[in-house]
Amino acid sequence: MKITDLNEDKGYIDYSADNFDPSNPTIAISGYGTITMSGFKKMIARDLENMKSEMEQGNMNFVMDLLSPSSSFIHKLQAYQDANDELSNPQTKRKLSNLSKTQ
């Protein structure tokens, strides 16, 4: 993972990443760094599992902190949504398709 300068979005596709894989693109996350899309999904799933576990133990303060608008979890969800929106863009799909053909 590397720290990068980012634009206004919380997350976007980082085409300049080393070993960029069009089938599993690298996502740059503001304030965090870069991670593959599949790794990003696993990270969010882990956070949700932790939230479930804490909830079952009755630690609602942890859950409330995790769901506060300024939490890192909410930031990750926004970054995921930004990257997912970019991935669903027809121009991005075409670019990724062309990149996969050249590899």
Image: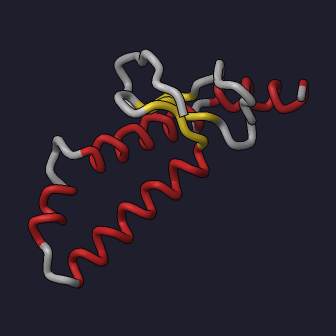
Residue 30 percent coordinates (x, y): 38, 28
Q: Looking at this rendering, what residue extends furthest in the front direction?
A: 2
* In-image side of 71 versus 45 (left or right): left
Q: Looking at this rendering, what residue extends furthest in the right direction?
A: 102
| Quadrant showing the N terminus | top right
Residue 86 percent coordinates (x, y): 53, 31
Above or below — where is 35 with respect to 63? above
Residue closest to the eye, 99 or 52: 52
Q: Looking at this rendering, what residue extends furthest in the left direction?
A: 61
Q: Residue at x 21, y 77 (%)?
A: 55
* In-image side of 2 versus 18 (left or right): left
Residue closest to the eye, 77 or 42: 42
Above or below — where is 53 with respect to 62? below
Colour scheme in the image? secondary structure
Residue 2 percent coordinates (x, y): 52, 27
Above or below — where is 39 with respect to 27? below
Q: Residue at x 69, y 43 (%)?
A: 24
Q: Residue at x 55, y 39 (%)?
A: 35
Q: Residue at x 35, y 29 (%)?
A: 31
Residue 10 percent coordinates (x, y): 37, 30
| Quadrant showing the C terminus | top right
